[in-house]
Image (spheres, rainbow, N blue to C red):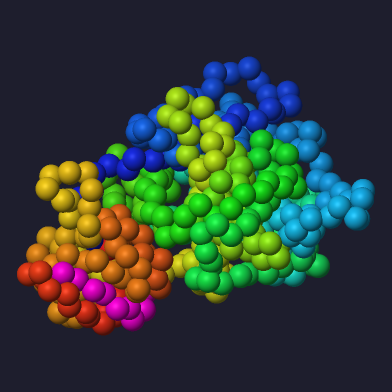
């Protein structure tokens, strides 16, 4: 039995991508970009680049945005944003991606001196259009190199590419478990192709769960949310920020006031009118999750994800839209939850010390953990709290 939740279709979607200018592109009709979900807020991937009718690879869009160093004209007025950006910007790159079906660009961060770069899966797959992209990376100093796709993870929308260059400046990872709401942050990337763009904000919320319609999941039909339509919602646990994040920032860095990575920018919310752009509601995958998944991709070409072995739905209060946990409907025989003692009818309210308010919350938390992780799960059973130590299974078993 596949693990899934019954909270309904995704409220958010990767969609409405920015169409980058392409030099001398044949005048053919653009392939329409389908709306993958409609809600009060429509989530759009921070991916720049539309589908174009050209198979010729081009870097023409970069002509408007050659990277520049962090400019300091008056050292007496340097502030923390300047310092953070100066520290992190040399580790942030711009990616150009092309396939027979389209082209686009996004951002990435250097992981190692010898060329490993972390970005989003929807950047390297052009939102699910290709599994065999042609990728070029431009460093912050303007130098350009071809890159090889090492692997991508559909479940948490992360990917690693390898650039044939030495001497990259690896980004410094901060511990995202130690973040506070209200902390100052800086987003660095290439919104609308403008490389090395710096925007300032704060952490607006932590442990936020968003559901995003992902075409990449269609390549893994065994995954829990597969609906057979070619687009399936994935649940991501993210950092919310009001730092301006726009199409093209995907895969770029969200850093603290020291220039240390706290998240990988992944998505933005829009007002639902089909327009892509920052309204002060952006999201980033926490650095601890990003580090774990990126290292597994480098080591094995893929990443593992936990499996609870439970079919859950929102525990709605008095038929309202508010939920107070994840209600367990069924269990996988001999699955992790059943082995630990969890029963149908239990309501999961905490997972690994984090509050669970919905089925999507629980799914995102479980998938953020590696297969085999041991976590504490608290449930409400007949009005009483019970705590279980659960050793998670492997989501790969769903395939």
Image quadrant where residue 115 sits: bottom right
Q: Does residue 2 appear left or right of residue 264 in this picture? A: left
Q: Position of residue 259 (x, y in %)?
A: 70, 63
Q: Kindly identify the residue that appears in the image at 36 percent across and 64 percent down.
A: 365
Q: Does residue 293 appear left or right of residue 89 in this picture? A: left
Specify start and end residues of the magenta stretch as a single range: 371-380
**Nearer to us in this view, 398 or 224:** 224
Q: Position of residue 84 (x, y in %)?
A: 74, 60
Q: Kindly identify the residue that appears in the image at 44 percent across and 39 percent down.
A: 43
**Quadrant of the snapshot with the N terminus:** bottom left
**Quadrant of the snapshot with the C terminus:** bottom left
Q: Position of residue 57 (x, y in %)?
A: 69, 37
Q: Is residue 352 visible?
A: yes
Q: Kindly identify the residue that appears in the image at 80 percent across and 35 percent down.
A: 63
Residue 82, placed above or below residue 268? below
**Nearer to us in this view, 365 or 16:** 365
Q: Position of residue 65 (x, y in %)?
A: 78, 38
């Amino acid at each position: 039995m596949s693990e899934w939740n019954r909270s309904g279709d995704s409220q958010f979607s990767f969609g409405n991508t920015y169409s980058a200018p392409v030099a001398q592109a044949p005048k053919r009709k653009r392939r329409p970009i389908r709306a993958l979900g409609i809600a009060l807020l429509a989530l759009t991937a921070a991916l720049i680049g539309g589908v174009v009718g050209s198979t010729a690879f081009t870097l023409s869009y970069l002509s408007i945005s050659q990277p520049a160093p962090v400019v300091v004209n008056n050292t007496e007025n340097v502030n923390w944003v300047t310092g953070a950006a100066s520290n992190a910007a040399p580790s942030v790159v711009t990616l150009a991606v092309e396939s027979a079906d389209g082209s686009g660009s996004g951002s990435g961060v250097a992981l190692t001196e010898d060329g490993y770069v972390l970005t989003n899966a929807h950047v390297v797959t052009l939102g699910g259009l290709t599994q065999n992209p042609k990728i070029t990376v431009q460093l912050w100093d303007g130098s350009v190199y071809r890159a090889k796709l090492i692997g991508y993870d559909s479940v948490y929308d992360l990917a690693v590419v390898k650039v044939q260059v030495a001497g990259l400046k690896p980004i410094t990872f901060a511990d995202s478990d130690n973040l506070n709401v209200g902390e100052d942050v800086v987003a660095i990337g290439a919104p609308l192709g403008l490389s090395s763009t710096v925007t300032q904000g704060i952490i607006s919320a932590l442990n936020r769960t968003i559901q995003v319609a992902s075409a990449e999941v269609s390549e893994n039909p065994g995954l829990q949310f597969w609906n057979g339509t070619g687009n399936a919602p994935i649940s991501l646990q993210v950092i919310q920020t009001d730092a301006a994040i726009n199409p093209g920032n995907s895969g770029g860095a969200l850093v603290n006031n020291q220039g240390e990575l706290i998240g990988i920018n992944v998505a933005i919310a829009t007002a639902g009118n089909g327009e892509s752009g920052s309204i002060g509601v952006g999201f980033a995958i926490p650095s601890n999750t990003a580090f774990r998944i990126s290292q597994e991709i480098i080591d094995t070409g893929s990443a593992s994800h936990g499996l609870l072995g439970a079919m859950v739905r929102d525990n709605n209060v008095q038929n309202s839209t508010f939920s107070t946990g994840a209600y367990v409907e069924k269990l996988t025989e001999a699955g992790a939850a059943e082995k630990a003692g969890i029963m149908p009818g239990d309501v999961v309210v905490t997972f690994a010390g984090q509050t669970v308010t919905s089925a999507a919350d629980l799914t995102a938390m479980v998938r953020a953990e590696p297969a085999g992780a041991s976590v504490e799960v608290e449930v409400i059973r007949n009005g009483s709290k019970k705590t279980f130590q659960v050793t998670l299974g492997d989501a790969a078993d769903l395939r």
